Amino acid sequence: MFEVVANIRLRNRWALIAIALLISVSVSLMQYFFSVQKNDANIINIAGKQRMLSQKIAWHGDKLLTSQVPSTDHQQSLDASLSLFKANHQYLLLKNDNGQYKYLSPELIKLYIQSPIELDLRVQKFIQQVEGLLYKQEKIDPNVFSVKRMEELLKYLDQAVGLFEKESVKKVAWVSSAELFFWLLTMLLLIGVLRFVFIPMEKQITKALSKYQQQKDFAQQVSKNKEHFIARASHEFRTPLQGFIASINSLEVSNSQKSIKTQASYCASRIIAMLDELQDLQALSLGRWALKPSNENLLQSFNKVLLGYEFGYSQKGITLVTTLDSTLDQAIKLDHQRFQQVLAELVGNALKFTEEGAVTVKACVSNKQLTVRITDTGSGLTKPVSKLTFNSSNQNNHFQGLRTGLARVQYIVDAFDGNIVFENTSQNGVRVTLKMPVVIDESAPSLSALLPKNLHCLVVEDNPLNMHILTRILSQLNYSYECAENGKVACEMATKNEYQVIFMDLNMPIMDGFEAIKKIRIFDANTPIIVVTANTSTEDMKLVYEYGASGHIHKPIGKQAIVDALVNVCMSSEIN
């Protein structure tokens, strides 16, 4: 018996040492590449500043050229901008001791050095012309700051930024591959531990305990240890994952890197969701849970789930079509958290098995019964599904991953006294129909009843895409709107016209949102101003409220975020 224990202990120690070394190497490598990415972000930031500085130089230079009276302010600003522009350009073209460019890839070398573009030569000529204007050293080409020339220079500077970003994305992809490799290696090591440590351990202990007629006590102890191990392992995984998510959310990245940040957050959240599935399935299967009904708006419960999957569907190029009946817009007594788990699992499962086309979600409440139909254009079912159970031998092609989520769905649906049916469609996809009784709280106001009516809005946004998204949502809410491309135009429009709500971006040319809010509040203290920004800085958010903002929404925006903001504004103001 003692020899068995000693043998197991030795194997376990070696396995733990190997896993610890592998994790340490993986973390060290990841830290190194994160530092490389930080440097890449700095380079991209510098390249991006070149576009802004060139525009600023052109503006001040044009003012000096066209002004008959010398302007000290324009000269000083031009001098400062030019100095920074030159320093940035020299930094981007730094060489190492071997005479090779430190930051330029072959594509960037071709853009900066080689013909026909020769961006370095163009920049040097531009700098020479500006210096000639600033220091009156030579005759200046009057067309140096023309729209055509500046657009041409900006185009090539934009290409440079794009190539710098492209190189950064390649490194991110490499890091992702390295991370996947170490993950696979860890899995192989764990399989080895299972094969050469735990399986032999189980056999040896069972044999030893059988000899001493203690098999029953041992089995009970193993069961308890397994449960504690799952709980402990889940806890140990969650702590670093929560810190990882918090670190991602606190990162301030450029617009071009927002999708990468969103993807990282999405993946980390999915890992936590998988841990939840394992623990939740154990509690459900053992009956250690109970429904916790609450009176909440059912439409909001749907939107919370569907909005969370917009990123995943857009990344895969699948259209998510939602047809949510107005009967959902009422208070329903239901365990909304458990229902959202069911809906999320079904919508996520449809995404997994749909490679092209669309996933349609339809829902309504009729005769105190909720009916939800989710139809995809995926691969379909190879055989009928009558009952969702957790069976690792089930190889149905429409269920992958941990295969615990759909088992949880069945437990929860049964607790709701509901029924769920899976069937193939004529287009080889799958249609899932969920029906369950609900209790309607007719005394609670609907979400649409809380929304203000007939709003005329002013949308202040310099980005055409963001402008389009926001105005489309306002149109869906049957609101009229006018648009302004910067804070200065918004102030002028606000003095001439009456608006019920102003949606204000913060980072804009000519006049930013901070200054615009201050100026509007001088002559209009009542009109609600909702800040719509990608800026998550606590100091900046505190500042906008000091200037007079009524609320804020963080980009990327969705319809539910706009609705929630308007409802909050409606409840705290006199909008009707």
Image: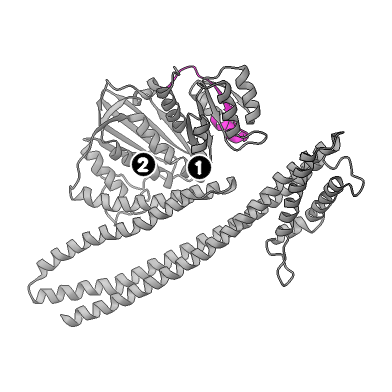
Residue 272 placed where, x, y %? Answer: 36, 52
Residue type at numbered disc 1: Glu
Residue marked by disc 2:
344
Residue marked by disc 1:
539
Question: Residue visible at 63% across and 21% down?
Answer: 493
- The answer to whether 86 is drawn above or below residue 194 in the figure is above
Residue 466 is a magenta residue: yes
- The answer to whether 539 is drawn above or below residue 206 in the figure is above
Q: Which residues are magenta?
A: 451-470
Question: Residue visible at 27% across and 27% down?
Answer: 369
- For this rendering, which residue is in front, 114 or 359? 114
Residue 188 placed where, x, y %? Answer: 38, 69
Q: Is residue 216 left or right of residue 548?
A: left
- Identify the image quadrant of the N terminus: bottom left
Label 2: how many Cα within 10 Å (few below 14, some 14–19, many 20+): many
Query: Of helix, strand and loop, which one carries label 1?
Result: helix
Q: Is residue 372 left or right of residue 294?
A: right
Mark 2 and mark 1: Cα distance apart in space: 35 Å
Q: Residue furthest right?
A: 139
Question: Marks 2 and 1: which is nearer the front?
Answer: 1
Q: Give the color scheme: rainbow, by chain, secondary structure or one colour.
A: one colour
Q: Is residue 534 left or right of residue 133?
A: left
